[in-house]
Image (spheres, rainbow, N blue to C red):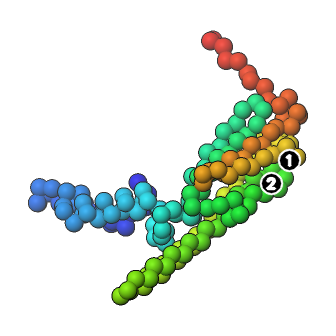
């Protein structure tokens, strides 16, 4: 678990149970766990925490592939740059909803932005790099250069 606001206290032997067994302490721990699991703190609103989209990076002998889950966004909301050997993906999501009924009106807005950079270990062919965006998933395919393919060598492990 990450940093908690619960101060450490010596086990209370006189009552026969420790601090972690008390009802309010259990509730406090569960609330801390909830914040750890969903957003690492405050400030995240809406269906998607814009500050932390999920990324998956994989590498083969021929290419590096990056998938980013960006639900609720369009390709126009995302920018991808490759500077030297640093791949940067940034985006911004703006959502507005307005509902007017006979006796009330509801207007909600949520904004969020993110930026994530990945250092690339291998040289990639910038001219052949591609990006596609489909059903809220950004897929980047970064082919390695011929030199990057040659530089990599698998070393066999022997038994002895």
Question: Is 9 situated above or below 67?
Answer: below
Say which quarter of the image contains residue 101. bottom left
Q: Position of residue 10 (x, y in %)?
A: 25, 60
Alpha carbon of mark 1 to alpha carbon of mark 2: how far? 8 Å
Residue located 49% across and 79% down the image: 98
Out of 108 and 32, give the one closest to the viewer: 108
Say which quarter of the image contains residue 8. bottom left
Q: Position of residue 129 (x, y in %)?
A: 81, 46
Quarter the N terminus occupies: bottom left
Query: Is mark 1 in CB contact (under 8 Å) with mark 2?
Result: yes
Which numbered disc covers residue 82? 2
Q: Position of residue 30 (x, y in %)?
A: 30, 59
How packed is label 2: few (under 14 Cα within 10 Å), some, or many (20 or more)? some
So how many labels did they put on this image? 2
Q: Which residue is mark 1?
A: 126
Question: In terms of sequence position, does the residue under pointer 1 or pointer 2 come before the other?
Answer: 2
């Amino acid at each position: 678990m990450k940093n908690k606001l619960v101060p450490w206290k010596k086990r209370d032997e006189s009552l026969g149970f420790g601090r972690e067994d008390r009802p309010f302490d259990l509730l406090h721990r569960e609330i801390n766990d909830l914040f750890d699991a969903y957003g690492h703190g405050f400030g995240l609103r809406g269906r998607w925490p814009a500050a932390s989209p999920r990324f998956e990076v994989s590498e083969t002998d021929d290419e590096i592939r990056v998938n980013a889950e960006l639900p609720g966004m369009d390709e126009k909301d995302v920018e991808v740059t490759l500077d030297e050997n640093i791949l940067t993906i940034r985006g911004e999501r703006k959502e507005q909803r307005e509902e007017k009924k006979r006796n009330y009106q509801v207007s909600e807005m949520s904004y969020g932005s993110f930026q994530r950079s990945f250092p690339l270990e291998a040289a990639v062919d910038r001219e052949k790099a591609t990006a596609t965006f489909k059903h809220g998933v950004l897929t980047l395919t970064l082919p390695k250069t011929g030199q990057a393919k040659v530089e990599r060598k698998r070393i066999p492990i022997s038994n002895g």
